[in-house]
Amino acid sequence: MNRKHSNHLQTVRERMDEACRRSGRAPESVRLLAVSKTHPASAVSQLHALGQRAFGESYVDEAVTKITELANPDIEWHFIGPIQSNKTRTIAEHFDWVQGVDRAKIVRRLADQRPDGRPPLNVLIQVNLDDEPQKAGCQPDRIAELADMIAGCDTLRLRGLMAIPAPRDAFDAQRAVFARLRELYENLRKDHPGIDTLSAGMSADLEAAIAEGSTMVRVGTALFGARNAAGT
């Protein structure tokens, strides 16, 4: 067993537990998504052996190689990268969750391409909170339309929202943007009371996200070490 992975996982869980304590929340109310993109299947296997179940991938071909190699039904695979139309079939066939749905075309393709016999694909709508042109995500005023569309598909299950805000160094500034996301989430729950997931917070800002109601934090760097790709 890789002691580095064990120590990193323990440290992240302690950060999450302390953030929950400060916010008056139960530790079990926040799930950890281990962002394993660019890391080998062996690293996923080691973290899984330590009790981590959910893993996030952003590159379809790399992810499918890991999913096929590990072939472990106990691992929950989340696609968290931008979704290209020509990759939707592969995503629908291999993943349990999709975080990052932001347009109707992708909703239709995922719904049509989810294989028979598999449970509905869990879907989060990605919101572009800072109106960044280079970043995926729908505008806040499009959330309701996409949510209704997803909820109307038997092969999809609407679970909530996710966002990747622009980096902010100050804790209060981090909280402020996550508070905006939380408001959008609470508004969505009025029409879709069954949603249960607010995916927000990464290695650098998970405490602020938890303080504002995040139910899932996406952590890569603090678990696996630094990488060239951004977004964890």
Image (spheres, rainbow, N blue to C red):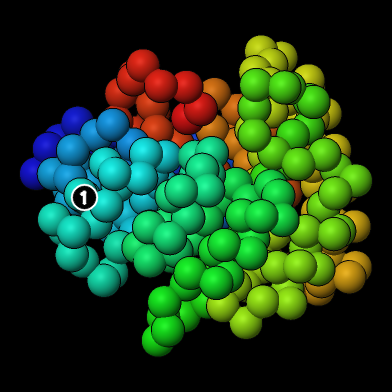
Q: Residue at x 61, y 55 (%)?
A: 106
Identify the residue at horizontal 52%, vertical 56% (top origin). Answer: 98
Q: Position of residue 117 (x, y in %)?
A: 40, 86
The foreground one among 187 and 97 is: 97
Please indicate, yes or no, whether residue 89 appears anywhere in the rendered image: yes
In the displayed structure, does residue 94 sit left or right of residue 4? right
Quick one: which residue is furthest to the bottom in this view? 117
Q: Secondary structure at mark 1?
A: helix
| Residue labelled with disc 1 | 66
Quadrant in the rendering for residue 146: bottom right
**Residue at the extreme top of the image, as rendered:** 169
Q: Residue at 35% of width from left, 63% of height from top?
A: 94
Residue drawn at 54 percent across, 39 percent down: 82
**Picture coordinates of residue 60, whole percent (x, y):** 35, 45
In the rendered view, tell whether residue 221 sits above or below residue 108.
Answer: above
Mark 1 nearby-residue class (10 Å; few <14, some 14–19, many ≥20): some
* Residue farthest along the left direction in this orientation: 1
